[in-house]
Image (cartoon, helix red, strand yellow):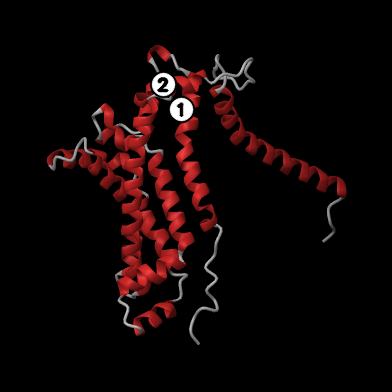
Amino acid sequence: MTRPPARRRTRRRLAADAGLLAVAAAFVLPLAWVVLSALDPDAGLRVKVPDGLTLDNFDAILTPEITFTPLLNSLVLCGGATLLTVACAALAAYPLSRFRSRLNRPFLLTILFATSLPITAIMVPVYALFVRVNMIDTMQGTIFFFAASQLPFAIWLMKNFMDGVPKELEEAAWTDGASSFQSLLRIVLPLMGPGVAVVTVFSFVMMWGNFFVPFMLLLSPDQMPASVSINDFFGNRGMVAYGQLAAFSIVYSTPVVLLYVLISRRLGGGFALGGAVKG
């Protein structure tokens, strides 16, 4: 085959670069609007450089009622549900990864099917169940449902990461008298740190941005998380405080960014256990 002429290769490269720039603009423009509008006293829907920079939008939202209490509620809900999800996913993934059974594959397929179920399809029976067991409008009830909704995919992810830890390392621990639970805590989980970090970040982010679940299960305004209270910036008759909405969005995104930064070095690590198995 003859190589295409240089002019044709140049056109293809320019077309690819233009496509990539268009995709980048689709991501950058909304972020630019958030940052610029948060500092603009006359923010609107247009992406524009403010005539004058101001922090009045941040001053208006940094109050206990608007920001601090909803953020604290979000941290309690998402943090508690994430810890519960990671713990249950590790305990469920361990036997699926380490023990062979004819039920493993059907169970994994059931988990995969459960990940595709939309939450809106099961909220009506869940709401009725929570009313019957007196868990409606409770933080612990919402935490349990958050964890249950994220658990199928968390188990699937955790099992795949756990498969990468050599079983020979556990066998050496069993020889020294360790139980399966001790080998899980002291050998498997520390060695699959990147996997645990991925499951933690994924679960926390999916819960942090969830509007529908807390909106349905929580009734008291003082228990609403930030994902629901952000709706208060959309007023009646189409009036929206765009500057305050943008400032709140920046503050609202900060915990997720900080979480990723704190464990990013764990995400970049690998298992590198090839020479750690016994001969």
Q: Which mark is residue 233?
A: 2
Does residue 18 lie above or below 219 as drawn?
Answer: below
Under circle 2, the secondary element is: helix
Residue at 22% in and 42% down = 126
Does residue 119 lie above or below 109 as drawn?
Answer: above
Residue 34 image position (x, y, % from top left) = 55, 27
Question: Are circles 2 and 1 on residues that touch, CB within 8 Å?
Answer: yes
Disc 1 residue type?
Phe
Select label 2 or label 1 by which is in front: 1
Residue 110 image position (x, y, % from top left) = 32, 59
Q: Residue 59 versus residue 221: which sits nearer the camera?
A: 59
Query: Gap between marks 2 and 1, in whole Å?
Result: 9 Å
**Left or right of residue 67, residue 131 in this image:** left
Q: Which mark is residue 248?
A: 1
Q: Residue 111 versus residue 207: which sits nearer the camera?
A: 207
Residue 128 image position (x, y, % from top left) = 17, 39
Disc 2 residue type?
Phe
**Left or right of residue 3, residue 16 in this image:** left
Whether residue 102 can be seen here: no
- Pick whichever of labels 2 and 1 is earlier in the sequence: 2
Residue at 47% in and 36% down = 253
Q: Can you name the residue that lies furthest to the top here?
A: 237
- Local crowd size for mark 2, using a 10 Å CA cut-off: few (<14), some (14–19), many (≥20): some
Q: Quadrant of residue 119?
A: top left
- Local crowd size for mark 1, using a 10 Å CA cut-off: few (<14), some (14–19), many (≥20): many
Residue at 32% in and 70% down = 95
